[in-house]
Image (cartoon, grey):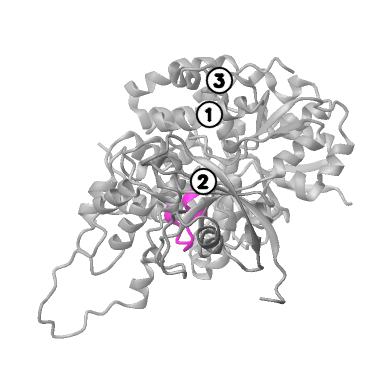
Amino acid sequence: MSKLKYALYTGCTAKESTPELLMSTMAIAKALDIELVVLDEASCCGASHLQDFDDQLSLTLNARNISYAEKHGLTMVTICNTCQLNTGMTKDRLDHDPKLKETINSKLNEVGLTYAGTSEVKHFLYALIDDLGVDAIAAKVTKPLTDMQIGAFYGCHNIRPGELHHKSNGGENAYAPTSLDRLILALGGKNVEYESKNKCCGFHVELQAPKTANKLSSTALADAIDNGAEAIVTPCPLCHLRMDTQQAHISQEAGRDLSIPILHMPQMVGLALGIEPAKLGLQHHVADVTFV
Amino acid sequence: MANVETKKMTFKVFRFNSETDYLPVYKNYTLDIAPGEVILDVLNRIKWEHDGSFSYRRSCRHGICGSCAVKVNGKATLACKDRVSDLVETFGEELVIEPQDETRAIKDMVIDKGTFWSKYNTVQPYLKATIDEAPQKENLVSPEQAEEIDEADYCIQCGNCYYSCPSVNANPDYLGPAALALTYRFNADVRDEGKTDRLDTVNQIGPGIWDCVKCFECAEACPKELDPIGKITKLHQQTFQEGMAADNVAVRHAVGFKPSIAKHGLLDEGELVRYSEGNIGVLKHVPVAIKMFKKGKIIMPWNMPKSKNMDEITKLIEIASTVKFKGK
Protein backbone atom coordinates (compact mmCIF):
# COMPACT_ATOMS: atom_id res chain seq x y z
CA MET A 1 0.00 0.00 0.00
CA SER A 2 1.38 3.43 -0.89
CA LYS A 3 1.84 5.87 1.95
CA LEU A 4 -1.39 7.52 3.10
CA LYS A 5 -1.40 11.28 2.69
CA TYR A 6 -4.11 13.75 3.65
CA ALA A 7 -4.75 17.46 3.96
CA LEU A 8 -5.42 18.09 7.66
CA TYR A 9 -8.13 20.58 8.59
CA THR A 10 -7.37 21.12 12.27
CA GLY A 11 -10.39 23.27 13.14
CA CYS A 12 -10.09 25.94 15.83
CA THR A 13 -10.34 23.87 19.00
CA ALA A 14 -7.19 21.84 18.29
CA LYS A 15 -5.25 25.11 18.02
CA GLU A 16 -6.75 26.57 21.18
CA SER A 17 -8.56 24.72 23.98
CA THR A 18 -7.58 21.16 23.04
CA PRO A 19 -3.90 21.43 22.06
CA GLU A 20 -3.55 17.79 23.08
CA LEU A 21 -5.75 16.77 20.15
CA LEU A 22 -3.38 18.28 17.59
CA MET A 23 -0.30 16.93 19.43
CA SER A 24 -1.67 13.40 19.57
CA THR A 25 -2.95 13.50 15.98
CA MET A 26 0.49 14.48 14.67
CA ALA A 27 2.21 11.96 16.95
CA ILE A 28 0.17 8.96 15.82
CA ALA A 29 0.25 10.02 12.16
CA LYS A 30 4.05 9.87 12.39
CA ALA A 31 4.00 6.52 14.17
CA LEU A 32 1.55 5.07 11.64
CA ASP A 33 3.47 6.55 8.69
CA ILE A 34 0.61 8.78 7.56
CA GLU A 35 1.55 12.13 6.01
CA LEU A 36 -0.57 15.10 7.05
CA VAL A 37 -0.35 18.44 5.24
CA VAL A 38 -1.76 21.06 7.62
CA LEU A 39 -4.15 23.51 5.95
CA ASP A 40 -3.00 26.67 7.73
CA GLU A 41 -5.07 28.81 5.35
CA ALA A 42 -8.34 27.31 6.59
CA SER A 43 -10.82 29.33 8.63
CA CYS A 44 -13.37 28.31 11.25
CA CYS A 45 -16.20 26.10 9.87
CA GLY A 46 -18.85 28.03 11.81
CA ALA A 47 -19.37 25.13 14.22
CA SER A 48 -23.00 24.55 13.17
CA HIS A 49 -23.93 28.02 14.44
CA LEU A 50 -22.71 30.46 11.77
CA GLN A 51 -25.15 29.01 9.20
CA ASP A 52 -28.04 29.81 11.55
CA PHE A 53 -27.06 33.45 11.05
CA ASP A 54 -25.76 33.55 7.48
CA ASP A 55 -25.98 30.44 5.33
CA GLN A 56 -24.18 31.83 2.30
CA LEU A 57 -21.25 33.09 4.35
CA SER A 58 -20.91 29.71 6.03
CA LEU A 59 -20.97 27.87 2.69
CA THR A 60 -18.41 30.24 1.18
CA LEU A 61 -15.93 29.88 4.04
CA ASN A 62 -16.26 26.10 4.12
CA ALA A 63 -15.93 25.85 0.34
CA ARG A 64 -12.76 27.94 0.60
CA ASN A 65 -11.34 25.51 3.15
CA ILE A 66 -12.06 22.54 0.90
CA SER A 67 -10.57 24.34 -2.11
CA TYR A 68 -7.21 24.32 -0.33
CA ALA A 69 -7.36 20.54 0.07
CA GLU A 70 -8.21 20.37 -3.63
CA LYS A 71 -5.11 22.45 -4.47
CA HIS A 72 -3.04 19.70 -2.85
CA GLY A 73 -5.07 17.05 -4.65
CA LEU A 74 -5.68 15.37 -1.31
CA THR A 75 -8.59 14.05 0.72
CA MET A 76 -9.30 16.43 3.57
CA VAL A 77 -9.29 14.89 7.03
CA THR A 78 -10.98 16.57 9.94
CA ILE A 79 -10.30 15.92 13.63
CA CYS A 80 -13.53 17.42 14.95
CA ASN A 81 -17.00 15.95 14.37
CA THR A 82 -18.56 19.37 13.92
CA CYS A 83 -15.91 20.42 11.37
CA GLN A 84 -16.75 17.16 9.59
CA LEU A 85 -20.47 18.00 9.63
CA ASN A 86 -20.10 21.54 8.34
CA THR A 87 -17.48 20.72 5.75
CA GLY A 88 -19.27 17.57 4.62
CA MET A 89 -22.61 19.32 4.45
CA THR A 90 -21.14 22.16 2.38
CA LYS A 91 -19.59 19.65 -0.01
CA ASP A 92 -22.82 17.69 -0.28
CA ARG A 93 -24.89 20.77 -1.06
CA LEU A 94 -22.47 22.22 -3.60
CA ASP A 95 -21.93 18.88 -5.33
CA HIS A 96 -25.68 18.35 -5.70
CA ASP A 97 -26.71 21.87 -6.64
CA PRO A 98 -24.85 23.29 -9.66
CA LYS A 99 -26.55 26.66 -9.29
CA LEU A 100 -25.49 27.00 -5.67
CA LYS A 101 -21.96 25.90 -6.57
CA GLU A 102 -21.84 28.57 -9.24
CA THR A 103 -22.99 31.25 -6.78
CA ILE A 104 -20.40 30.25 -4.18
CA ASN A 105 -17.69 30.01 -6.83
CA SER A 106 -18.52 33.51 -8.04
CA LYS A 107 -17.47 34.67 -4.55
CA LEU A 108 -14.40 32.44 -4.34
CA ASN A 109 -13.25 33.49 -7.83
CA GLU A 110 -12.91 37.03 -6.58
CA VAL A 111 -10.06 35.90 -4.33
CA GLY A 112 -8.59 33.61 -6.98
CA LEU A 113 -10.04 30.36 -5.62
CA THR A 114 -12.46 27.76 -6.99
CA TYR A 115 -14.37 24.93 -5.38
CA ALA A 116 -14.29 21.98 -7.77
CA GLY A 117 -15.66 19.14 -5.63
CA THR A 118 -12.64 16.92 -6.25
CA SER A 119 -11.55 16.31 -2.64
CA GLU A 120 -13.33 13.93 -0.31
CA VAL A 121 -13.81 15.00 3.30
CA LYS A 122 -13.52 12.44 6.09
CA HIS A 123 -12.85 12.35 9.79
CA PHE A 124 -9.43 11.06 10.84
CA LEU A 125 -11.13 8.19 12.72
CA TYR A 126 -12.42 6.82 9.41
CA ALA A 127 -9.11 7.42 7.66
CA LEU A 128 -7.63 5.12 10.30
CA ILE A 129 -10.43 2.55 10.26
CA ASP A 130 -11.33 2.45 6.56
CA ASP A 131 -8.12 3.48 4.76
CA LEU A 132 -5.38 2.17 7.04
CA GLY A 133 -7.48 -0.59 8.62
CA VAL A 134 -7.66 -1.92 12.17
CA ASP A 135 -5.32 -4.82 11.37
CA ALA A 136 -2.53 -2.48 10.29
CA ILE A 137 -3.01 -0.48 13.50
CA ALA A 138 -3.12 -3.63 15.64
CA ALA A 139 0.16 -4.74 14.08
CA LYS A 140 1.89 -1.64 15.45
CA VAL A 141 0.60 -1.91 19.00
CA THR A 142 3.44 -2.18 21.49
CA LYS A 143 1.59 -1.43 24.72
CA PRO A 144 -1.82 -3.07 24.37
CA LEU A 145 -4.58 -1.53 26.48
CA THR A 146 -5.02 -4.91 28.14
CA ASP A 147 -7.96 -5.19 30.50
CA MET A 148 -8.81 -1.54 30.10
CA GLN A 149 -12.58 -1.01 29.94
CA ILE A 150 -13.22 1.83 27.53
CA GLY A 151 -16.52 3.41 26.59
CA ALA A 152 -16.67 4.68 23.00
CA PHE A 153 -18.47 8.01 22.75
CA TYR A 154 -19.11 8.66 19.06
CA GLY A 155 -20.37 12.26 19.03
CA CYS A 156 -23.36 13.23 16.88
CA HIS A 157 -21.75 14.92 13.92
CA ASN A 158 -19.75 11.94 12.65
CA ILE A 159 -22.75 9.63 12.47
CA ARG A 160 -25.85 11.81 11.95
CA PRO A 161 -27.38 12.55 9.52
CA GLY A 162 -26.48 9.03 8.36
CA GLU A 163 -27.20 9.75 4.73
CA LEU A 164 -24.73 12.66 4.63
CA HIS A 165 -21.89 10.74 6.26
CA HIS A 166 -22.57 7.42 4.58
CA LYS A 167 -19.69 7.67 2.12
CA SER A 168 -17.18 9.25 4.49
CA ASN A 169 -17.77 7.01 7.50
CA GLY A 170 -17.78 3.60 5.90
CA GLY A 171 -21.56 3.33 6.12
CA GLU A 172 -21.59 3.46 9.93
CA ASN A 173 -25.12 2.98 11.24
CA ALA A 174 -26.14 5.90 13.45
CA TYR A 175 -28.15 3.59 15.72
CA ALA A 176 -25.43 0.95 16.02
CA PRO A 177 -22.01 2.47 15.33
CA THR A 178 -19.03 0.11 15.62
CA SER A 179 -15.86 1.88 14.35
CA LEU A 180 -14.59 3.23 17.65
CA ASP A 181 -15.44 -0.04 19.41
CA ARG A 182 -13.47 -1.97 16.78
CA LEU A 183 -10.56 0.40 17.29
CA ILE A 184 -10.59 -0.18 21.07
CA LEU A 185 -10.50 -3.94 20.48
CA ALA A 186 -7.68 -3.62 17.94
CA LEU A 187 -5.61 -1.79 20.57
CA GLY A 188 -6.11 -4.64 23.02
CA GLY A 189 -8.71 -2.88 25.16
CA LYS A 190 -12.19 -3.99 26.13
CA ASN A 191 -15.08 -1.99 24.70
CA VAL A 192 -17.94 -1.19 27.04
CA GLU A 193 -21.49 -1.46 25.71
CA TYR A 194 -23.74 1.34 26.92
CA GLU A 195 -26.83 3.01 25.49
CA SER A 196 -25.54 6.59 25.45
CA LYS A 197 -22.55 5.92 23.21
CA ASN A 198 -24.22 7.46 20.16
CA LYS A 199 -26.10 10.19 22.06
CA CYS A 200 -25.60 13.95 22.34
CA CYS A 201 -23.28 15.56 24.94
CA GLY A 202 -25.13 18.89 24.88
CA PHE A 203 -22.11 21.01 23.92
CA HIS A 204 -23.94 23.19 21.41
CA VAL A 205 -26.40 24.60 23.95
CA GLU A 206 -23.92 24.99 26.79
CA LEU A 207 -24.39 28.77 26.83
CA GLN A 208 -28.12 29.20 26.18
CA ALA A 209 -29.45 26.00 27.81
CA PRO A 210 -26.91 24.91 30.42
CA LYS A 211 -29.44 22.70 32.23
CA THR A 212 -30.09 20.70 29.07
CA ALA A 213 -26.35 20.45 28.38
CA ASN A 214 -25.63 19.23 31.91
CA LYS A 215 -28.44 16.72 31.85
CA LEU A 216 -27.26 15.21 28.56
CA SER A 217 -23.61 14.97 29.56
CA SER A 218 -24.36 13.64 33.03
CA THR A 219 -26.61 10.93 31.55
CA ALA A 220 -23.85 9.87 29.15
CA LEU A 221 -21.09 9.90 31.80
CA ALA A 222 -23.22 8.01 34.33
CA ASP A 223 -24.27 5.45 31.72
CA ALA A 224 -20.65 4.74 30.74
CA ILE A 225 -19.50 4.54 34.38
CA ASP A 226 -22.41 2.34 35.46
CA ASN A 227 -21.61 -0.10 32.68
CA GLY A 228 -18.04 -0.44 33.87
CA ALA A 229 -16.11 2.09 31.79
CA GLU A 230 -12.75 3.17 33.27
CA ALA A 231 -12.25 5.73 30.53
CA ILE A 232 -14.23 7.28 27.70
CA VAL A 233 -12.79 7.89 24.24
CA THR A 234 -14.19 10.33 21.71
CA PRO A 235 -13.25 11.49 18.21
CA CYS A 236 -14.76 14.93 18.90
CA PRO A 237 -12.96 17.75 20.74
CA LEU A 238 -16.27 19.44 21.53
CA CYS A 239 -17.57 16.33 23.32
CA HIS A 240 -14.15 16.25 25.00
CA LEU A 241 -14.37 19.87 26.17
CA ARG A 242 -17.82 19.21 27.53
CA MET A 243 -16.99 16.00 29.40
CA ASP A 244 -13.43 16.84 30.46
CA THR A 245 -13.32 20.55 31.33
CA GLN A 246 -16.89 20.63 32.68
CA GLN A 247 -16.75 17.25 34.44
CA ALA A 248 -16.59 18.57 38.01
CA HIS A 249 -19.44 20.98 37.31
CA ILE A 250 -21.55 18.26 35.68
CA SER A 251 -20.96 15.99 38.70
CA GLN A 252 -22.07 18.77 40.99
CA GLU A 253 -25.24 19.39 38.99
CA ALA A 254 -26.00 15.67 38.81
CA GLY A 255 -25.42 15.18 42.52
CA ARG A 256 -23.06 12.25 42.06
CA ASP A 257 -19.40 11.71 41.32
CA LEU A 258 -18.94 11.32 37.59
CA SER A 259 -15.14 11.33 37.51
CA ILE A 260 -13.73 9.45 34.57
CA PRO A 261 -10.78 10.12 32.26
CA ILE A 262 -11.81 11.35 28.80
CA LEU A 263 -9.42 10.54 25.98
CA HIS A 264 -9.25 11.89 22.46
CA MET A 265 -9.30 9.09 19.91
CA PRO A 266 -5.67 9.72 18.79
CA GLN A 267 -4.49 9.75 22.42
CA MET A 268 -5.90 6.27 22.93
CA VAL A 269 -4.19 5.04 19.76
CA GLY A 270 -0.96 6.76 20.81
CA LEU A 271 -0.92 5.11 24.22
CA ALA A 272 -1.24 1.68 22.62
CA LEU A 273 1.52 2.53 20.14
CA GLY A 274 3.80 3.23 23.09
CA ILE A 275 4.03 7.00 22.62
CA GLU A 276 4.88 8.87 25.84
CA PRO A 277 1.81 10.44 27.51
CA ALA A 278 3.46 13.90 27.46
CA LYS A 279 3.71 13.76 23.66
CA LEU A 280 0.01 12.96 23.56
CA GLY A 281 -0.77 16.01 25.68
CA LEU A 282 -2.28 14.21 28.66
CA GLN A 283 -0.94 17.02 30.86
CA HIS A 284 -3.50 19.32 29.21
CA HIS A 285 -6.53 17.51 30.65
CA VAL A 286 -8.68 19.04 33.36
CA ALA A 287 -10.25 15.76 34.53
CA ASP A 288 -7.86 13.29 36.13
CA VAL A 289 -6.03 10.94 33.74
CA THR A 290 -3.54 9.44 36.20
CA PHE A 291 -4.77 5.91 35.43
CA VAL A 292 -2.19 5.95 32.65
CA MET B 1 -47.16 -19.42 1.35
CA ALA B 2 -45.88 -22.93 0.72
CA ASN B 3 -42.78 -21.82 -1.14
CA VAL B 4 -41.83 -18.96 1.13
CA GLU B 5 -38.89 -19.67 3.35
CA THR B 6 -39.60 -18.41 6.84
CA LYS B 7 -37.30 -17.92 9.76
CA LYS B 8 -38.11 -18.47 13.42
CA MET B 9 -37.44 -15.34 15.43
CA THR B 10 -38.07 -14.30 19.01
CA PHE B 11 -39.06 -10.71 19.75
CA LYS B 12 -38.77 -9.14 23.16
CA VAL B 13 -41.80 -6.90 23.58
CA PHE B 14 -42.65 -4.19 26.11
CA ARG B 15 -45.92 -4.98 27.93
CA PHE B 16 -47.59 -2.58 30.32
CA ASN B 17 -51.08 -1.60 31.39
CA SER B 18 -51.09 1.73 33.21
CA GLU B 19 -54.44 0.88 34.86
CA THR B 20 -53.25 -2.31 36.53
CA ASP B 21 -49.44 -2.54 36.41
CA TYR B 22 -46.84 -0.89 38.58
CA LEU B 23 -43.96 -1.70 36.26
CA PRO B 24 -43.69 -2.89 32.66
CA VAL B 25 -42.47 -6.38 31.73
CA TYR B 26 -40.75 -7.61 28.57
CA LYS B 27 -42.33 -10.72 27.07
CA ASN B 28 -40.84 -12.96 24.39
CA TYR B 29 -42.89 -13.93 21.34
CA THR B 30 -41.62 -16.44 18.80
CA LEU B 31 -42.89 -16.09 15.24
CA ASP B 32 -42.04 -17.45 11.79
CA ILE B 33 -40.91 -14.43 9.82
CA ALA B 34 -41.16 -14.36 6.04
CA PRO B 35 -38.85 -12.22 3.92
CA GLY B 36 -40.18 -8.71 3.47
CA GLU B 37 -42.29 -8.74 6.62
CA VAL B 38 -42.37 -5.44 8.48
CA ILE B 39 -42.65 -4.70 12.20
CA LEU B 40 -46.39 -4.08 11.82
CA ASP B 41 -46.77 -7.72 10.68
CA VAL B 42 -45.02 -8.72 13.90
CA LEU B 43 -47.32 -6.56 16.02
CA ASN B 44 -50.42 -7.87 14.21
CA ARG B 45 -49.42 -11.50 14.63
CA ILE B 46 -48.61 -11.06 18.31
CA LYS B 47 -52.16 -9.79 18.74
CA TRP B 48 -53.84 -12.31 16.44
CA GLU B 49 -51.83 -15.41 17.31
CA HIS B 50 -50.57 -14.88 20.87
CA ASP B 51 -52.45 -12.32 22.95
CA GLY B 52 -55.57 -10.48 21.84
CA SER B 53 -55.10 -7.89 24.57
CA PHE B 54 -51.84 -6.62 23.02
CA SER B 55 -52.34 -2.94 22.15
CA TYR B 56 -50.80 -0.70 19.51
CA ARG B 57 -51.99 2.04 17.18
CA ARG B 58 -52.31 1.29 13.48
CA SER B 59 -54.43 2.41 10.59
CA CYS B 60 -53.30 2.99 7.03
CA ARG B 61 -50.51 0.41 6.64
CA HIS B 62 -48.99 2.70 3.99
CA GLY B 63 -46.75 5.14 5.87
CA ILE B 64 -49.31 7.94 5.67
CA CYS B 65 -51.24 8.01 8.95
CA GLY B 66 -48.25 8.05 11.33
CA SER B 67 -50.06 5.89 13.90
CA CYS B 68 -47.82 2.85 14.16
CA ALA B 69 -44.53 4.50 15.21
CA VAL B 70 -42.60 2.38 17.75
CA LYS B 71 -39.00 1.88 18.82
CA VAL B 72 -36.96 -1.17 17.85
CA ASN B 73 -33.67 -1.50 19.75
CA GLY B 74 -33.86 2.23 20.40
CA LYS B 75 -34.33 3.09 16.73
CA ALA B 76 -37.35 5.18 15.85
CA THR B 77 -39.34 3.21 13.32
CA LEU B 78 -42.64 3.32 11.51
CA ALA B 79 -43.87 -0.24 12.04
CA CYS B 80 -45.51 -0.47 8.62
CA LYS B 81 -42.37 0.70 6.84
CA ASP B 82 -39.41 -0.88 8.63
CA ARG B 83 -38.55 -4.41 7.52
CA VAL B 84 -37.56 -7.01 10.09
CA SER B 85 -34.67 -8.09 7.83
CA ASP B 86 -33.22 -4.56 7.71
CA LEU B 87 -33.41 -4.27 11.48
CA VAL B 88 -31.71 -7.65 11.87
CA GLU B 89 -28.95 -6.42 9.59
CA THR B 90 -28.37 -3.44 11.92
CA PHE B 91 -28.94 -4.98 15.33
CA GLY B 92 -28.64 -8.74 14.95
CA GLU B 93 -31.45 -11.18 15.76
CA GLU B 94 -32.32 -9.93 19.23
CA LEU B 95 -34.97 -7.35 18.48
CA VAL B 96 -36.64 -5.41 21.30
CA ILE B 97 -39.90 -3.64 20.49
CA GLU B 98 -40.89 -0.73 22.73
CA PRO B 99 -43.24 2.25 22.60
CA GLN B 100 -41.76 5.56 21.39
CA ASP B 101 -41.42 6.72 24.99
CA GLU B 102 -41.74 4.12 27.74
CA THR B 103 -42.43 6.78 30.36
CA ARG B 104 -45.61 7.84 28.55
CA ALA B 105 -46.99 4.33 27.96
CA ILE B 106 -50.74 3.89 28.49
CA LYS B 107 -50.96 0.32 27.28
CA ASP B 108 -48.17 -1.62 25.56
CA MET B 109 -47.21 0.39 22.43
CA VAL B 110 -49.91 3.02 22.96
CA ILE B 111 -48.51 6.19 24.50
CA ASP B 112 -50.06 9.43 25.68
CA LYS B 113 -49.15 11.92 22.94
CA GLY B 114 -50.81 14.81 24.79
CA THR B 115 -47.76 17.06 25.11
CA PHE B 116 -46.79 16.37 21.51
CA TRP B 117 -50.16 17.62 20.29
CA SER B 118 -50.40 20.60 22.63
CA LYS B 119 -46.95 21.84 21.54
CA TYR B 120 -47.93 21.18 17.97
CA ASN B 121 -50.97 23.42 18.36
CA THR B 122 -48.90 26.20 19.99
CA VAL B 123 -47.31 27.14 16.67
CA GLN B 124 -50.61 27.64 14.80
CA PRO B 125 -49.87 24.87 12.30
CA TYR B 126 -52.37 25.98 9.68
CA LEU B 127 -52.59 28.53 6.92
CA LYS B 128 -53.36 32.03 8.21
CA ALA B 129 -54.65 34.07 5.34
CA THR B 130 -57.32 36.56 4.47
CA ILE B 131 -59.51 34.66 2.07
CA ASP B 132 -61.41 36.44 -0.65
CA GLU B 133 -64.81 34.76 -0.57
CA ALA B 134 -65.56 35.58 -4.18
CA PRO B 135 -62.21 35.39 -5.98
CA GLN B 136 -62.09 36.58 -9.59
CA LYS B 137 -59.09 34.40 -10.48
CA GLU B 138 -57.07 31.48 -9.19
CA ASN B 139 -54.66 32.03 -6.33
CA LEU B 140 -51.54 30.88 -8.15
CA VAL B 141 -48.45 29.51 -6.40
CA SER B 142 -45.45 29.02 -8.66
CA PRO B 143 -43.44 25.78 -8.55
CA GLU B 144 -40.48 27.77 -7.17
CA GLN B 145 -42.63 29.18 -4.37
CA ALA B 146 -43.99 25.73 -3.59
CA GLU B 147 -40.45 24.36 -3.45
CA GLU B 148 -39.67 26.75 -0.61
CA ILE B 149 -41.79 24.55 1.65
CA ASP B 150 -39.06 22.00 1.07
CA GLU B 151 -40.88 18.79 1.96
CA ALA B 152 -41.93 20.17 5.36
CA ASP B 153 -45.53 19.31 4.47
CA TYR B 154 -44.67 15.60 4.29
CA CYS B 155 -44.99 15.41 8.09
CA ILE B 156 -47.38 12.64 9.18
CA GLN B 157 -47.27 13.60 12.89
CA CYS B 158 -45.92 10.20 13.89
CA GLY B 159 -43.89 11.81 16.68
CA ASN B 160 -40.69 9.87 15.98
CA CYS B 161 -38.61 13.06 15.87
CA TYR B 162 -40.21 14.40 19.04
CA TYR B 163 -39.64 11.28 21.13
CA SER B 164 -36.08 10.91 19.80
CA CYS B 165 -35.18 14.50 20.67
CA PRO B 166 -32.84 14.70 23.71
CA SER B 167 -33.71 18.36 24.19
CA VAL B 168 -37.41 17.51 24.61
CA ASN B 169 -36.38 14.92 27.14
CA ALA B 170 -34.21 17.34 29.12
CA ASN B 171 -36.43 20.40 28.84
CA PRO B 172 -40.21 19.85 29.00
CA ASP B 173 -40.84 23.35 27.61
CA TYR B 174 -39.03 22.72 24.33
CA LEU B 175 -41.50 22.55 21.44
CA GLY B 176 -39.52 19.87 19.64
CA PRO B 177 -38.70 19.17 16.00
CA ALA B 178 -42.20 18.31 14.69
CA ALA B 179 -43.82 21.56 15.84
CA LEU B 180 -40.82 23.57 14.61
CA ALA B 181 -40.78 21.85 11.20
CA LEU B 182 -44.47 22.68 10.87
CA THR B 183 -43.75 26.27 11.87
CA TYR B 184 -41.39 26.42 8.94
CA ARG B 185 -43.90 24.73 6.64
CA PHE B 186 -46.42 27.56 7.10
CA ASN B 187 -43.85 30.35 7.39
CA ALA B 188 -42.48 29.32 4.00
CA ASP B 189 -45.92 29.32 2.41
CA VAL B 190 -46.30 32.35 0.15
CA ARG B 191 -50.05 32.56 0.92
CA ASP B 192 -49.54 32.69 4.69
CA GLU B 193 -49.74 35.81 6.84
CA GLY B 194 -48.82 34.37 10.23
CA LYS B 195 -45.03 34.32 9.96
CA THR B 196 -44.33 37.09 12.49
CA ASP B 197 -46.68 35.55 15.06
CA ARG B 198 -45.10 32.15 14.73
CA LEU B 199 -41.54 33.51 14.83
CA ASP B 200 -42.45 35.31 18.04
CA THR B 201 -43.41 31.96 19.57
CA VAL B 202 -40.42 29.93 18.37
CA ASN B 203 -37.82 32.65 18.93
CA GLN B 204 -37.93 32.30 22.74
CA ILE B 205 -35.12 30.64 24.67
CA GLY B 206 -36.66 27.63 26.44
CA PRO B 207 -39.45 26.53 24.11
CA GLY B 208 -38.00 27.67 20.80
CA ILE B 209 -35.40 27.07 18.12
CA TRP B 210 -32.42 28.11 20.26
CA ASP B 211 -32.79 25.02 22.43
CA CYS B 212 -32.09 22.64 19.55
CA VAL B 213 -28.95 20.73 20.59
CA LYS B 214 -28.01 20.01 16.95
CA CYS B 215 -27.76 16.26 17.43
CA PHE B 216 -29.63 15.35 14.20
CA GLU B 217 -31.62 12.61 15.99
CA CYS B 218 -34.75 14.05 14.37
CA ALA B 219 -33.30 13.84 10.87
CA GLU B 220 -32.43 10.22 11.52
CA ALA B 221 -35.80 9.37 13.08
CA CYS B 222 -38.11 10.90 10.46
CA PRO B 223 -39.71 8.17 8.31
CA LYS B 224 -40.61 10.77 5.66
CA GLU B 225 -37.03 12.11 5.54
CA LEU B 226 -38.19 15.69 5.83
CA ASP B 227 -35.11 16.75 7.81
CA PRO B 228 -36.71 18.59 10.76
CA ILE B 229 -33.40 20.09 11.94
CA GLY B 230 -32.89 21.59 8.48
CA LYS B 231 -36.20 23.40 8.98
CA ILE B 232 -35.09 24.59 12.42
CA THR B 233 -31.97 26.04 10.77
CA LYS B 234 -34.18 27.86 8.28
CA LEU B 235 -36.24 29.29 11.15
CA HIS B 236 -33.03 30.58 12.70
CA GLN B 237 -32.27 32.30 9.41
CA GLN B 238 -35.80 33.71 9.18
CA THR B 239 -35.44 35.43 12.55
CA PHE B 240 -32.41 37.31 11.20
CA GLN B 241 -33.92 37.97 7.78
CA GLU B 242 -37.05 39.39 9.42
CA GLY B 243 -35.03 41.46 11.89
CA MET B 244 -36.68 39.57 14.75
CA ALA B 245 -33.60 38.00 16.36
CA ALA B 246 -33.54 39.13 19.99
CA ASP B 247 -30.35 40.44 21.54
CA ASN B 248 -29.78 37.44 23.82
CA VAL B 249 -27.08 34.90 24.58
CA ALA B 250 -28.29 32.35 22.02
CA VAL B 251 -28.51 34.83 19.17
CA ARG B 252 -25.15 36.40 19.98
CA HIS B 253 -23.69 32.88 20.10
CA ALA B 254 -24.69 32.39 16.44
CA VAL B 255 -23.64 35.89 15.37
CA GLY B 256 -20.37 35.91 17.32
CA PHE B 257 -18.53 33.59 14.95
CA LYS B 258 -18.46 36.24 12.25
CA PRO B 259 -16.46 39.01 14.01
CA SER B 260 -14.04 36.39 15.24
CA ILE B 261 -13.51 34.89 11.79
CA ALA B 262 -13.16 38.41 10.37
CA LYS B 263 -10.37 39.11 12.84
CA HIS B 264 -8.48 35.81 13.01
CA GLY B 265 -9.95 33.47 10.40
CA LEU B 266 -10.28 31.07 13.31
CA LEU B 267 -12.76 31.29 16.14
CA ASP B 268 -11.50 33.05 19.25
CA GLU B 269 -13.20 30.71 21.74
CA GLY B 270 -12.82 32.93 24.79
CA GLU B 271 -14.03 35.98 22.93
CA LEU B 272 -17.09 34.07 21.64
CA VAL B 273 -18.10 33.27 25.21
CA ARG B 274 -17.61 36.91 26.23
CA TYR B 275 -19.47 38.19 23.17
CA SER B 276 -22.37 35.79 23.78
CA GLU B 277 -22.66 36.19 27.55
CA GLY B 278 -21.76 39.87 27.83
CA ASN B 279 -19.15 41.36 30.20
CA ILE B 280 -21.08 40.41 33.34
CA GLY B 281 -22.54 37.08 32.21
CA VAL B 282 -19.10 35.85 31.26
CA LEU B 283 -18.00 35.95 34.90
CA LYS B 284 -19.80 32.68 35.68
CA HIS B 285 -17.39 30.92 33.33
CA VAL B 286 -14.30 32.19 35.16
CA PRO B 287 -13.87 29.21 37.54
CA VAL B 288 -13.72 26.72 34.65
CA ALA B 289 -11.59 29.14 32.61
CA ILE B 290 -9.02 29.28 35.43
CA LYS B 291 -8.83 25.47 35.54
CA MET B 292 -8.40 25.44 31.76
CA PHE B 293 -5.77 28.17 31.88
CA LYS B 294 -3.70 26.15 34.35
CA LYS B 295 -3.72 23.25 31.89
CA GLY B 296 -2.67 25.35 28.92
CA LYS B 297 -6.12 25.35 27.35
CA ILE B 298 -6.68 29.10 27.12
CA ILE B 299 -5.04 31.20 24.43
CA MET B 300 -4.52 34.82 25.43
CA PRO B 301 -5.82 37.39 22.91
CA TRP B 302 -2.29 38.46 21.99
CA ASN B 303 -1.37 34.87 21.16
CA MET B 304 -4.42 34.07 19.03
CA PRO B 305 -3.35 32.08 15.97
CA LYS B 306 -4.43 33.48 12.60
CA SER B 307 -5.37 31.74 9.37
CA LYS B 308 -2.95 32.28 6.49
CA ASN B 309 -4.18 34.45 3.60
CA MET B 310 -6.44 36.54 5.86
CA ASP B 311 -6.99 38.98 2.99
CA GLU B 312 -9.10 36.34 1.21
CA ILE B 313 -11.20 35.76 4.31
CA THR B 314 -11.72 39.50 4.84
CA LYS B 315 -12.79 39.92 1.23
CA LEU B 316 -15.14 36.92 1.30
CA ILE B 317 -16.84 38.14 4.45
CA GLU B 318 -17.37 41.45 2.69
CA ILE B 319 -18.86 40.00 -0.50
CA ALA B 320 -20.61 36.82 0.70
CA SER B 321 -22.46 38.11 3.78
CA THR B 322 -26.23 38.32 3.34
CA VAL B 323 -27.61 39.50 6.68
CA LYS B 324 -26.83 41.93 9.46
CA PHE B 325 -27.52 41.80 13.17
CA LYS B 326 -27.72 45.17 14.83
CA GLY B 327 -27.95 43.93 18.40
CA LYS B 328 -28.60 46.42 21.13
User: Residue at the spot x=35%, y=45% of the render?
Assistant: B209
Precedes in sequence: disc 1 or disc 3: 1
- Is B196 colored magenta in this rendering? no
Q: Amino acid at mark 3?
A: Leu
Quarter of image, res B128: bottom left
Quarter in which the C terminus of chain B is drawn: top left
Over which residues does the magenta segment extend? B216-229
Q: CA distance from mark 3 to mark 2?
A: 31 Å
* Subunit ID for the residue under disc 2: B
Mark nearer the viewer, 3 or 2:
2
Marks 3 & 2 on one chain: no
Q: Is residue B227 magenta?
A: yes
Of labels 1 and 3, the one closer to you: 3
Q: Chain of mark 3?
A: A
Question: Can residue B324 be seen by looking at this rendering?
Answer: no
Q: Chain of mark 1?
A: A
Q: Which mark is residue B14?
A: 2
Q: Would you name the residue on which mark 3 appears?
A: A258
CB atoms at circles 3 and 2 under 8 Å apart?
Answer: no
